[in-house]
Amino acid sequence: MKKKVFSYLFILILLLGLAVRLFRLDLRPMHHDEANQAYKFGLLLEKGEYRYDPSDHHGPTLYYFSLPFAWLSGQKTYADLAENTLRGVAAFFGIFTILLLLATGKYLTVAEKSWAAVFLAIAAPVIYFNRFYIQETMFVAFGLAFVFCLWRFIQKPDFREAVWLGLTAGLLYATKETSLIVFGSAALALVLIWFWSRLKNRKRRGERTRTLRQADLKAMIKAFWPVLTAVLVFLAVSFIFYSSFLRYPQGLMESYRSLAGYTHKALEAGWHQHGFWYYFSLLFFHKEGPNSPVFSEIPFLALALYGLVLSLAGFSRKAAENFRPYLALFALVTALVYSAIPYKTPWNLLIFYAIFLVLAGVGFARLLALIKIRQARIILAGALLLWTGWQSYLVNIYFHSFPANPYVYAQTLPDFMRLVSRVEELASVSKDGREMLMKVIAPPEETWPLPWYLRRFTQVGYWTASEQVEALEPAEIVIMSAGEAGKRAGTELDSYYTQYFSLRPDVLLTLCVREDLWENYRLRKSASPPVR
């Protein structure tokens, strides 16, 4: 394929990936994790305040990289923010991940890069989490950038590659402290490549072996200053972000201390604990019931396995030709580590699945080269694209928030949006409008994402338990978890009209509307002309 043709093709793939990520970004209700991150970013946007929290939220890059998106959208306060703006950050870094394939240079063929780009652009789970305002998409983007830059540095350990390596490592660590898994997996993959290379050359004995080792020693000495440069850049980038751009210097040290807490969380997973095969069970085959469609990434997994076998089987004595085995080993090690950790959430699979898709591109390019009949190649490629297109539609559009979708995890249900709409309608008939007094009484896990959807209301109070609130009056609206509503005296609730809405499966919220406000709303609604 000519360079110019490849350039046009790659641009088309990027545009396709961008289109499927931006299409109806606000379709799915905000997940409670997204809403929590949005609130954290809102403080930075409004007040310029950010302080690293070692117990939660992960690193700061998500918030700082969100700033230009908010500024370009003309959104200057938390209340101004929109789902499209926030999720647009994740969508952008999803496209950036595809663009990173160009950094592989000569280590992947044009066909391999092209198919890897297509798969990253349209794979259903990748799109799904590229539309999520959490750190994971940025983590994958910086993770792949680090993996590619590490290989490039090993092949050419000069100061230019050292800066890129340190920059990507710093951004990766500033995104999630758990990036140590990626660092360790990449290092182990390189060690395995080195050890394997030694075995391949075991027949070389005597002086030739000693000369080779002396050459390696000289190369290591020569690389000392570039390695030191990479480490310094890594520390500088990490420090800048964790210190809130030098306002909070102890932030970087706190990120190191947080590792003990995250290790404990990983081992004592609570309700996030899942078995070893959890991630692959989501990808391989999922069918919720007799009326549910099949969700499966089997075609990509099969191609990834084929590409992995080809990569390992094609191991060369020449170090520069072992990029594919390096990716294969990194993907295997990372997948095994994440699968072995008891704490699991679906989006954590993204870091190793992205590499699997690159390997799938390697496998598919090789498979098409073996097929001599042009029409057969077209049919095979068309069938694969149709299948993944159908899967992407099911995952991201039709079942965007429903438990039948394997990637839905503690997701806010669409029924919750009825509660939000009802509150807005009630505000329109209240004399105080969005300044009416509201009380929210629910534990934190049953409160979010309410603070996001009530961000434009100025008189909202939040309590975690009913015992903390002496009386519901004079609040016009009270929103309570079902458990906290059960604690209130019946006579007190008699002055409120009550409705129930689903927040998540098996989690109900109680909307209590003061009788005078409800009567105004009912009269206004009955006076409205019927919709034709």
Image (spheres, rainbow, N blue to C red):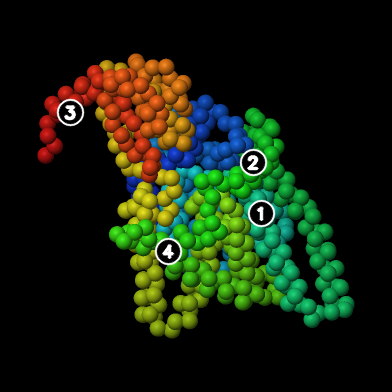
* Among the two numbered marks 4 and 1 on one chain, the one whose residue lies closer to the N terminus: 1
Image spot of residue 435 (x, y percent): 35, 20
Counting every numbered tag in the picture gives: 4
CA gap, disc 3 to disc 1? 59 Å
Image spot of residue 382 (x, y percent): 36, 71
- Residue that appears at 67% across and 75% down: 316
Q: Nearer the viewer, residue 470 or 22?
A: 470
- Residue that appears at 65% across and 58% down: 185
Q: Nearer the viewer, residue 36 or 203?
A: 36
Label 4: element kind: loop
Amino acid under disc 4:
Phe
In the orientation shown, which residue stands out farthest toward the bottom? Answer: 372
Marks 4 and 3 close (CB-CB < 8 Å): no
Q: Which residue is mark 3?
A: 525
* Among the two numbered marks 3 and 2 on one chain, the one whose residue lies closer to the N terminus: 2
CA gap, disc 4 to disc 2? 33 Å
Q: Which residue is mark 1?
A: 183
Q: Which residue is mark 2?
A: 261
Badge 1 crowding class, 10 Å Cα cut-off, few under 14, some 14 to 19, many 20 or more, is some
Which is closer to the viewer, label 4 or label 3?
4
* Among the two numbered marks 4 and 2 on one chain, the one whose residue lies closer to the N terminus: 2
Amino acid under disc 3:
Lys
* Among the two numbered marks 3 and 1 on one chain, the one whose residue lies closer to the N terminus: 1
Image spot of residue 23 (x, y percent): 35, 50
Amino acid under disc 2:
Gly
Label 2: element kind: helix
CA gap, disc 4 to disc 3? 47 Å
Based on the displayed image, in which of its 4 quarters is residue 251 positioned? Answer: top right
Q: Which residue is mark 4?
A: 285
Vertical placement of residue 21 versus 214, above or below:
above
